[in-house]
Image (tube, rainbow, N blue to C red):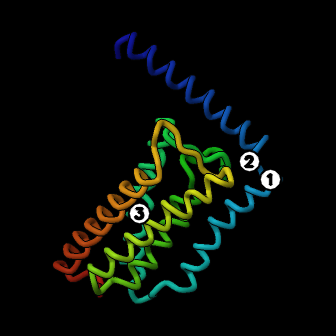
Amino acid sequence: MAKEQENQLEKIRLLNEQLSQLETDYWYQFSNMGEIKFWVVLLLFVAPLIALLLFIDRRRVFLLCFYGFNIHVWFGYLDTWGVKQGIWEYPYQLLPFLPGNVTLEASLMPVAFIFVYQLTIASFKKYLISTLALSAFWCFILKPIFVMHDLFRLYKGVNFFHLFITLIGVFLFSKLLTYIFLKLSEQSGTFISD
């Protein structure tokens, strides 16, 4: 490895280490278990997972969870990118060492979309209408409430409509991947479908 490359990597590593320490210090000072908003974030993480355990269609659990995992992964990548680019931030985190917002990425959003998928699995038209409605609710009602209560902040001219378009892309891509893998597994006869 060239010396210049080695120096750049070392600089990045040190800055990442400093950023991690700064985020941890911030969490202990402003976002810890002594703060009411920490408990709100925890509730928004735990409640959807409990609802999922209680109400998921167990006959389709792998299909539904595969779809939800897709939502989680793609939304997680996008969310982490947005935070790293300074486009948005979450002033209150569940844990300081996890990127983005694990409450939204791993629980609230995937579970909400899993339930929509579960209810509309037989009709793409119903799925499309329902996910558009959920995305609109998410971006034009829930996210503004999060902003109002300092749980989410937008920067650099990004607005809720931008989030809406992005969310549509995530759920359509997740549906497409789920469809592709479902068809592949049906061809091999190893997966239980609809």
Residue type, numbered disc 3: Ile
Residue assigned mark 3: 71
> Which residue is depicted at the point 60% across and 50% down?
152
Please indicate, yes or no, whether residue 66 appears anywhere in the rendered image: no
* Quadrant location of the C terminus in the rendered image: bottom left
Q: Position of residue 18 (x, y in %)?
A: 63, 27
152 is higher (above) or lower (below) than 44 = above
Q: Is residue 180 left or right of residue 73?
A: left
| Secondary structure of residue under mark 1 | loop
The residue indicated by pointer 1 is 35
Looking at the picture, how far across and down is residue 21, in whole percent? 67, 33
User: How far is the residue under mark 2 from the one under mark 3?
Assistant: 26 Å
- In the rendered structure, which disc, 2 or 3, sits on the residue that comes first in sequence? 2
Q: Residue at x 40, y 82 (%)?
A: 118
Per the image, the residue denoted by label 2 is: 31
Callout 2 touching callout 1 (CB < 8 Å) = yes
Which quadrant would residue 117 be assigned to in this image?
Answer: bottom left
- Around disc 3, counting alpha carbons within 10 Å, would you say few (fewer than 14), some (14 to 19), or many (20 or more)? many
Instruction: Say whether marks 2 and 3 touch (CB < 8 Å).
Output: no
Quarter assignment of residue 175: bottom left
